Image (tube, grey):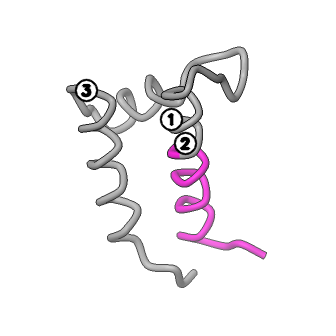
Amino acid sequence: MLTGNQIIKARLLALQSGMNLEAKGLRMNSGRTALSIVKQEFGFKGSRAKIQKQLQKIIDSMPNTP
């Protein structure tokens, strides 16, 4: 069971996976893209690769403990 920070980290990992799929031309859902969600939530600007690196830094800095 996921609790606390683990839920947030799992969501970020799902967004990261969505961005990887979008880079290959696929979509996770018919709504907003994962890239647009990440850009809006974190205020990132730049290319997809730059945003993926910034998101990876945030994910790596988060603890795995609840």
Determine whether, in the image, residue 63 is placed left or right of residue 61: right
In space, the residues marked 1 and 2 are separated at their CA atoms by 6 Å
Give the numbered dot on residue 39: none
- Quadrant of the drawing holding the N terminus: bottom right
Task: Please give the name of the residue rendered at 58% of the width and 18% of the height, measured from the top-left corner.
Answer: 32
At label 3, the amino acid type is Ser
Determine whether, in the image, residue 26 is placed left or right of residue 38: right
Task: Please give the name of the residue rendered at 53% of the width and 62% of the height, measured from the top-left corner.
Answer: 9
Task: For the residues labelled 1 and 2, say whether their Cβ atoms are less than 8 Å apart.
Answer: yes
Work out which residue is located at the far bottom of the displayed protein and give it: 65
Q: Quadrant of residue 56?
A: bottom left
Helix, strand or loop at label 2? It is: helix
The correct choice, above or below, for 55 with respect to 66 in the image is above
Residue hosting label 3 = 47
At label 2, the amino acid type is Leu
Q: Is residue 22 magenta?
A: no
The correct choice, above or below, for 31 with respect to 17 in the image is above
Magenta stretch mostly in which secondary structure? helix
Instruction: Identify which residue, 38 or 20, lies in the foreground.
Output: 20
Instruction: Identify which residue, 13 or 49, lies in the foreground.
Output: 49
At label 1, the amino acid type is Met
Percent position (x, y) of residue 2? 71, 72
Task: For the residues labelled 1 and 3, say whether their Cβ atoms are less than 8 Å apart.
Answer: no
Q: Quadrant of residue 51?
A: top left
Question: Which mark lies nearer to you, 2 or 3?
Answer: 3
Work out which residue is located at the far right of the displayed protein and give it: 1
- Mark 1 neighbour density, 10 Å: few (under 14) some (14–19) many (20 or more): many
Give the residues drawn in magenta, as a range. Answer: 1-16
Percent position (x, y) of residue 59? 40, 62
Residue hosting label 2 = 15
Residue hosting label 1 = 19
